[in-house]
Amino acid sequence: MTSFALHGIGVSRGIAIGRAQLISHATLEVAHYTIPANRVDAEIERFSNALNEVQRELEALRGTLSADDAPAEVGAFIDVHWMILSDPTISETPRRIIAEQRCNAEWALTQQMNVLGGEFEEIEDPYLRERKADVVQVVERVLKRLLGKPGKIVPISAEQHTILVAHDLSPADIIQFKQHRFAAFLTDLGGVTSHTAIVARSLNVPAVVATHNARQLIRENELLIVDGTNNVVIVNPDKSVLAEYRLKQSELELERAKLKRLKSKAATTIDGEHVDLCANIELPEDLAEAIEVGADGVGLFRSEFLFLNRAGLPSEDEQFEAYRTVAQGMGRPVVIRTFDLGADKQKEGLDGLARVAPNPALGLRAVRFCLAEPKLFLTQLRAILRASRFGKVSILVPMLASVSEIDQTMDMLAQAKETLREQGVPFDPDISVGGMLEIPAAILAVSSFLHRLDFVSIGTNDLIQYTLAVDRSDDAVSHLYDPLHPAVLRLVSMAITAANRAKVPVAVCGEMAGEPRMTRMLLGMGLRNFSMHPAHLLTVKQRVLTTDLREITPIVARMRRSDDPGRLAALLDRLNA
Ligand code: PEP
Ligand code: MG
């Protein structure tokens, strides 16, 4: 077996050594080849066999369900798949395509899936339209059989290490994987701050994205080393490389154990300045990790994750329970971001999101979507208000571009408060409302925002995306996604300075806050509140503890004045020397 290396972008640090498990995707391009006339019948038979196997697989699954007393809808779901599989459009038409076009079965089936997909999109009824996803799932099952990879994801034992290799994973896919133990992730697509990467980090396993063709080059069960820190994947490593990485792995573990000792130490610089280090979470379950590293609070609860991976919407009560759990469990300040749906975090079946936006990142996303769907927004605001009685809760509004969006949000909040008052439900009437500064316009006109808000939080992930016009989830432009771009640094610095002057608390909650290389620069810009994935918190704390503001401030002042990327990089190196 030849050994080779693949390069990508490490989005979650650390080293994992394990066996590849390929995740196939029906939408992935399937190979297309011509079948000689005398092999057509055999190809049709190969297709029939795959269909029969999947049919048996579904029947077996159905059988185990009735024995398990599983909820009725799970059975119904399998029945729908069984029906799709038996429908002539799936079971017959591809046979005709194979015969007529003399093509391979995978190609025939995928072509037919695309035709059906187009027809489903024309359907007006949203329920039926969504069944397109079922067709894709059924086709995927058959494709896996045809390719000889009946792949269902199985939980692994502690000794065995499995590395998921996929063309792409959606944030929702990864959330699903949370229940299983995987050693690492690899994807062909993605960027550093794509939401997929952020969720991968939240699993605290090494991950490398944007490998371009890992999914094609790696075979099932091959031995892999994923080095998320150095952006590299080694396939079939030889003995000496393997030994070297095992050594590195144990060194890293030792380092992690040392960091753990910093948990209850206050984050104070050498010259005595205190810094708040908070955690970003996606679901109430993530709280445990935030507490484990001694976070000063939750600086960003990405509440939209409550909406993903589920049928229907979470009710007011369900949301209230989630927010209360976090507020009470943390016992320290918790910032709940109102949901940031849209762009790459699509929720099926929501009216405003159902159409395909021509440019989702610039479309009806985050606060824009909330204001367009007042019922949904009011439900969330009431749920947050109700939870505000159980801890120090604040509201954070994402993606503000104009102050009118704050005014409209405040009107909605007043309405939500009024409803609760009428119902006699208690809440904190003085709940703080903050805004995310993640669109350059909001920072360029920041004073009007600071007048209206109790605090601000800089979302560097989107700020970089919108400043540099680089889609954060598009691997084709990920090399242009540059947190150290002079324009980005200038905007971050402007926002911190203006907020400090106006005495409005300011935090950074984008990935920049969890990047230890950036800690001193941000401190030098005047930042005293960082919110990041808990996995980075102790490393950042270590940086804070070893920083003397008197030494770094003059270097950061020079960074602020510079527009030259080379000089900026050199000054950053000096800061971290
Ligand atoms: C950001 O944009 O920096 C941010 C923190 O929000 P998200 O990554 O969820 O868009
Ligand atoms: Mg954002």
Image (cartoon, helix red, strand yellow):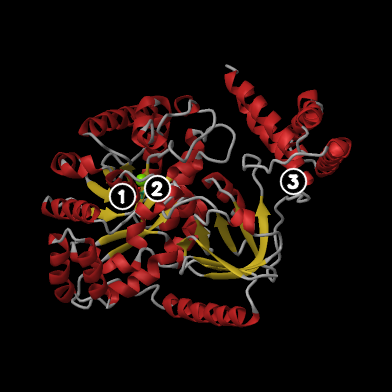
Q: Pointer 3: what residue?
A: 144
The image quarter containing residue 84 is top right
Q: Is residue 126 left or right of residue 381?
A: right
Q: In terms of depth relative to the viewer, which is nearer, 26 or 360?
A: 26
Q: Pointer 1: what residue?
A: 464
Residue type at the position of mark 3: Lys
Q: Pointer 2: what residue?
A: 472
> Total label count?
3
Residue type at the position of mark 2: Arg
| Secondary structure of the residue carrying numbered label 3 | helix
Pinpoint residue 85: horizontal percent, then vertical percent: 79, 31
Q: Is residue 52 visible in the rendered structure shown here?
A: no
Pinpoint residue 120: horizontal percent, then vertical percent: 63, 23
In terms of sequence position, does the residue under pointer 1 or pointer 3 come before the other?
3
Quarter of the image where the N terminus is located: bottom right
Pinpoint residue 196: horizontal percent, then vertical percent: 49, 50
Residue type at the position of mark 1: Ile
